[in-house]
Amino acid sequence: LKIDQVIEVGPVPKYVAVTPDDSTVLVSNWCGYDLSVVDTGTGKETRRIPLGRFPRGIAVTPDSRTAFVAVMGSTDIAVVSLPDGKVSWMNGVGQGPRHLVLDADGKYLYATLNAEGKVAKIDVASRTVLAKVSSPIAPRSMTIAPDGRSLYVVNYESDQISKIRTSDMTQLQRVPTGHHPIGITYDPVDHRVWVACYSGSLYVFDDTTP
């Protein structure tokens, strides 16, 4: 458990993602308004890409060539070409996009909209929002089941998590947690959802029922 490397990035690194091919680490710098691109082989930052106010969640396509970054101080999601660092945009997705996940095929992108109290489903090819579902209040972190059928979202201000069916973006269930749930992950072996709360507690939910 020794520290192997220390890599300098931008101010207040907020979210870290590794590309599927393990070649690149991406870091959203909350107070730097940019994205650090780090080469895993050298442990050095190779590029820093300006994105705007409060970049947050990151999702990377299965081919490791494109990264989506939620810019929480806007209504937009940045689309970053990793080979050349060029940026295009998904504009007007919703208020306060925070966390992003992709399905396994990279066909659909899901975004929590913290300021809007909703979760959006986006078609990656056309860059259009297909549907939104209410997930109040302050949906923040999110995870997706390995089969892509369900999303699990922490609702920070309502002390609850939501289970959402991705096919039609219907909320299937909402259950209480401790105060201010913030972290969430899915255990694919035991089919359990783990939730971390700022109150200092962990909640584990069984998800074996389809």
Image (cartoon, helix red, strand yellow):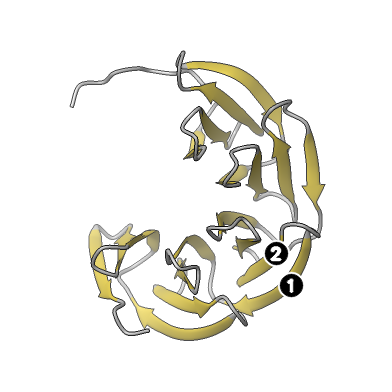
**Relative to the observer, which residue lies in front, 49 or 139?**
49
Could you tell me which residue is drawn at 65 percent across and 46 percent down? 68
Q: Amino acid at mark 2?
A: Ile
- The image shows residue 199 at horizontal and vertical percentages of 28, 60
- Circle 2: element type: strand
Answer above or below: position of 153 versus 31.
below
Circles 1 and 2 in contact, beta carbons < 8 Å: yes
In the image, is residue 93 above or below residue 64? below
Give me the disc on residue 164.
none
Cα distance between the residues tagged 1 and 2:
6 Å
Q: Relative to residue 208, is residue 114 drawn left or right?
A: right
Q: Quadrant of residue 36?
A: top right
Q: Which residue is mark 1?
A: 130
How packed is label 2: few (under 14 Cα within 10 Å), some, or many (20 or more)?
many
Q: Secondary structure at mark 1?
A: strand
Which residue occupies 45% across, 68% down?
A: 147
**Which quadrant of the figure has residue 193?**
bottom left
The quarter of the rendered structure image containing the N terminus is top left
Query: Which residue is labeled 2 in the image?
Result: 122
Is 64 in front, or is 164?
A: 64
Q: Quadrant of the C terminus?
A: bottom left
Up the image or down, 65 lies above or below 90; here it is: above
Q: Position of residue 35 (x, y in %)?
A: 62, 32
Q: Residue at x 45, y 76 (%)?
A: 162
Does the rendering let one see residue 129?
yes
Furthest residue in direction left, as rendered: 1
Query: Residue 181 location, x and y as percent?
Result: 38, 64
Type of the residue with mark 1: Leu
* Label located before the other in sequence (1 or 2): 2
